[in-house]
Amino acid sequence: MHDVRIITRSIACPFEDAYERAHPPEFFEQWAAGMASSLHRDGDRWVAATQAGQAEVRFSPRNDFGVLDHHVLLPGGQDIYIPLRMIANGDGTEVSLWLFRQPDMDDATFEDDATMVEKDLDTLKALLEG
């Protein structure tokens, strides 16, 4: 089992509105810094530049459950699973991302990843509340 950190933000935006805006892959470009400058459609698939090279990104299909999970398939074959959920909370929405420590990832890199996710979720919150 991998170490995991669940990073959550409360968003003052109704669940239905938040999910409808957030689920298209094009919207990830606006808030997910790791993909923001390079995510693009290539035929039927989405690709993004990573430190390891060009990666394929697979997004969950639209659904009624707030699931925004995605996989980043690195050139070497590593599949990084990123669970991301939206849950109604009264008139607002909770968004949570499960950050798994990858094999051979040191503590500093895991902390850097967590900090980046926190900033990304802060950006998502600002976009959805704005």
Image (cartoon, rainbow, N blue to C red):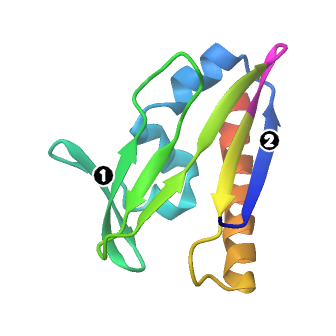
Horizontal placement of 47 versus 94: left or right?
A: left
Q: Position of residue 86 (x, y in %)?
A: 67, 30
**N-term mark: 2 or 1:** 2
Secondary element at image label 1: strand
Q: Where 36 falls versus 107 (above or below)?
A: above
Q: Is residue 71 above or below residue 1?
A: above
Give residue 9's mark: 2
- The quarter of the displayed image where residue 11 is located: top right
Q: Is residue 5 visible?
A: yes
User: Left or right of 70: which side holds 66?
Assistant: right
Magenta range: 89-94
Q: Is residue 53 above or below residue 91?
A: below
Mark 2 nearby-residue class (10 Å; few <14, some 14–19, many ≥20): some
Crowdedness of circle 1 by 10 Å Cα count: few (<14), some, many (20+)?
some
Residue type pointed to by label 2: Arg
Is 78 or 22 nearer to us in this picture?
78
Q: Residue furthest front?
A: 1
Q: Position of residue 53 (x, y in %)?
A: 32, 76
Q: Quadrant of the C terminus?
A: top right
- Residue under the image location 69 percent in, 75 percent down: 110
Residue 100 in picture, x, y percent from top left: 64, 62
Residue bearing mark 1: 40
**Residue for point 58% across, 24% down:** 19
Name the chief secondary structure element in magenta.
Answer: strand
Instruction: Please check the rendered image and state whether residue 92 is part of the magenta-colored stretch, yes or no.
Output: yes
Say if 74 sits above or below 127 in the image: below
At label 1, the amino acid type is His
